[in-house]
Amino acid sequence: MTETENQAQENSAIFPASATQAADASAEEGQCPKRFVLSVRTKGLIVLSALVIYAFVIALFMFHEKRELMQDFEVIQMSLEKDGMLRDADSAAFHAVMAVFANLDATNRAEGVQRIKVHLQSLRVRHSNLQQHIEGFDIRMDGVDKALMLTDLDPSKTNMNQLIVELVKVKNEFTDLAESSQQARERMSEQYRMQTDSVALTSLFLGSFGLALLGAITLLFFRQLAKDLHALQTRAMEIVNSFRGEPIPVRRQDEVGQLMRAVNSMATALDKREKELLLERQKYFHQEKMAAIGALAAGVAHEIGNPIAAICGIADDMSERRSYGLGICSEETCRPCRPDIIREQAQRLAAITREISEFASPQPAEPQFLDLNAQLRSTSNMLRYDKRMSRVELCLKLDSQLPAIYGVADQLTQLLMNLMINAMDALDPVMDRPPAITISTRIEDGKVCLTVEDNGFGMEKDVLDKAFDAFFTTKPAGKGTGLGLSLCYSIMQNHEGSIEIDSTPGIGTRVRAFFPIKEIS
């Protein structure tokens, strides 16, 4: 078998036709359950929408305050108009008073009264305008009208003086009302100025607060984004350097979070593939090793076969000579010679060579129907030469009616060796009772059941839960790689079977492998 063919066989074993489906399944296993996802674009749109809404609220606030300020401004404008009208009325009252004074000593007082009426008419017009435009205007001109009527009937000095007194009263009322209106306008102007400053400061604060909040959110977002991207970069470099480690904690629900979950899934899938690859390589190395041992055993058998045959021939010849008394050989003279022991040991040596040759002979790589009991006997015979078995009692309880199983002979040999070696390792520290391994076969629930049981110290639950994990071992460095049971699990999966372990601390461990029964076509 060339190196290219070996590689092709290894790749076909590792990456079968359903490799793509298996990779997809591995990726799905590493993913979290579906949840509400906010993409980076969606987050950007949310921030932009919040910014637009915030700007709209500020605009509404400013328009509302502007309307309030415009109303105050209109009130101030009306106050100015009111002041103007009051000043006009005050001026008209002043001119009326002056007109009365001017005509107080006139020769023709009747004509003077007519001139006074003209000024009073102007005052009445101003007074009427004030009544129409000023709500609650309560300055009355009844006294002026009454005094004017008396003056018109009798333009005497006394009546004119009375008219002057009434006009002065009205003028003073106009003056007081004008001063009061001016003070109210000044207060409104000051309030308007303060409100304008307040609106300006509030708008500036809201704008600055919005910008600061947006800047803080942007800074935190990009800071976390940079941190997560750095974690992704570090994780990617760890994966490249064949270090898996713990998965990246995923707290994001956007594209970056999906990428982190994908990287975690990729690391899990790669780790799984690497372990599968290592298991397949172990199977392949086992085949190569067994082939090399088989070739060596065949060579050894060939090389020592003739000397063994010669030794057996000499022993047989010695026995014949003793039996027939040929030559000098007789029962008495050749008593120290033991040709039977020579022949027995030579036959034993020949049997050992034959067992090694048969055990390590090349096996077909394709599945076929096999005798599980024969495989067990062959494997147990070989392991008897392990020095650890010298103190172990091996008991075989094989069902003679066991049907054939369908599998790969070399992989079954590897399975049996791993289970028996594990049992021997478990019995190493046992000193308080005779160490024993019991191997049995039988039909159970329509399947062929292989049981390997030892009376070692057993396994704790936390160890038992990890027994089939690749690279997990409780053996010291140099005595185990942690691939034995994992390889057994893989072999049983390839044979469409199952394997399970029952262990009780202080009592022992029992491993059961179940093979499906297939009809021979």
Image (spheres, grey):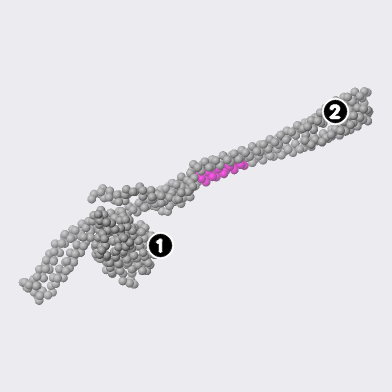
Instruction: Answer yes or no: is residue 485 visible.
Output: no
Amino acid residing under circle 2: Leu
Instruction: Answer yes or no: is residue 64 visible.
Output: yes
Q: Name the outermost residue toward the bottom.
A: 332
Question: Where residue 277 appears, x then y in whole percent?
Answer: 32, 52
Total number of numbered discs in the rendering: 2
Question: Where residue 32 appears, x then y in whole percent?
Answer: 44, 50
* Quarter location, residue 179: top right
Q: Is residue 457 magenta?
A: no
Query: What range is drawn magenta here?
Result: 204-222
Q: Determine whether, in the image, residue 367 is placed left or right of residue 247.
A: left
Q: Name the outermost residue toward the left.
A: 327
The disc, 2 or 1, on the residue closer to the chain's N-terminal end is 2
| x 84%, y 30%: residue | 93
How many other residues sit within 10 Å of disc 2, few (<14), some (14-19) or many (≥20)?
many
* Quarter location, residue 290: bottom left
Which mark is drawn over residue 120? 2
The residue carrying mark 1 is 462
Amino acid residing under circle 1: Asp
| x 41%, y 53%: residue | 245
Question: Where residue 30 appears, x then y in whole percent?
Answer: 41, 51
Badge 2 marks a residue whose secondary structure is helix
Depth order, front residue of 481/68: 68
How many other residues sit within 10 Å of disc 1, few (<14), some (14-19) or many (≥20)?
few
- Secondary structure mostly taken by the magenta-highlighted segment of the chain: helix
Q: Is residue 205 magenta?
A: yes
Q: Determine whether, in the image, residue 431 is placed left or right of residue 168.
A: left
| x 30%, y 67%: residue | 437
Q: Determine whether, in the image, residue 243 is placed left or right of residue 182.
A: left
